Image (cartoon, rainbow, N blue to C red):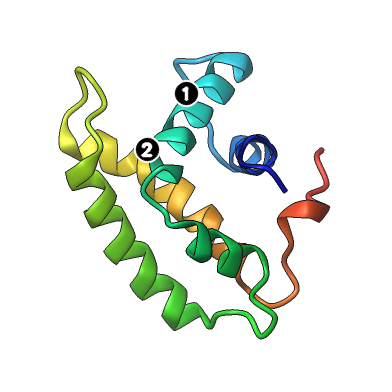
Amino acid sequence: MTEQEFSAALTDRINLQLDLPWLTEAQEALAIRWCIDQVARYIPIPTREFILDASDGLSDAEIARLIDTLVNFLNAKIDIPWMPETVEEQMLRPIVTAVLQLAKNGVSLTTVELA
């Protein structure tokens, strides 16, 4: 799976779960995709590969711990213009959560079913 395919599939998955009331669905998808592209450059390729192919999955406790760690790390590295840090964190958390949920047993980015 290419990085663009990874980003597109992840955008679709997150857009189903996230509602930004001040944006249209198309604008939401653009905002989500932008955030994903910002996040993806800091996630090493081996980590992405692990997430996409975690054969034994991650436990909920492992995922919760990783979410907090990655969100804090990424929020320190990524600056979304004109947004306070708390809003940036709210934008990053669903993206990081969705990425890590892919590593749960039985979940696959390549089999996302869109509504």
User: Which corner quadrant of the image does residue 7 belong to?
Assistant: top right
Q: Along the horizontal axis of the image, is 49 left or right of 32? A: right
What residue is drawn where x is 22% and y is 19%?
81
Q: 10 Å neighbourhood of mark 2: few (<14), some, or many (≥20)?
A: many
For the residue pair 26 and 19, the one nearer the viewer reads as: 26
Q: Find numbered disc 1 in the image and state the secondary structure of the residue it sits on.
A: helix
Quadrant hosting residue 108: bottom right
Quarter-of-image position of residue 102: bottom right
Tag 2: residue type? Answer: Met
Residue 107 spot, x, y in % from top left? 72, 66
Is the Cβ of the residue at disc 2 closer than 8 Å to that at disc 1?
yes
Mark 1 — residue? 31
Q: Amino acid at mark 1?
A: Ala
Q: Quick one: SS at disc 2?
A: helix
Residue closer to the observer: 72 or 54: 54
Quadrant location of the C terminus in the rendered image? top right
The residue pinned by badge 2 equals: 91
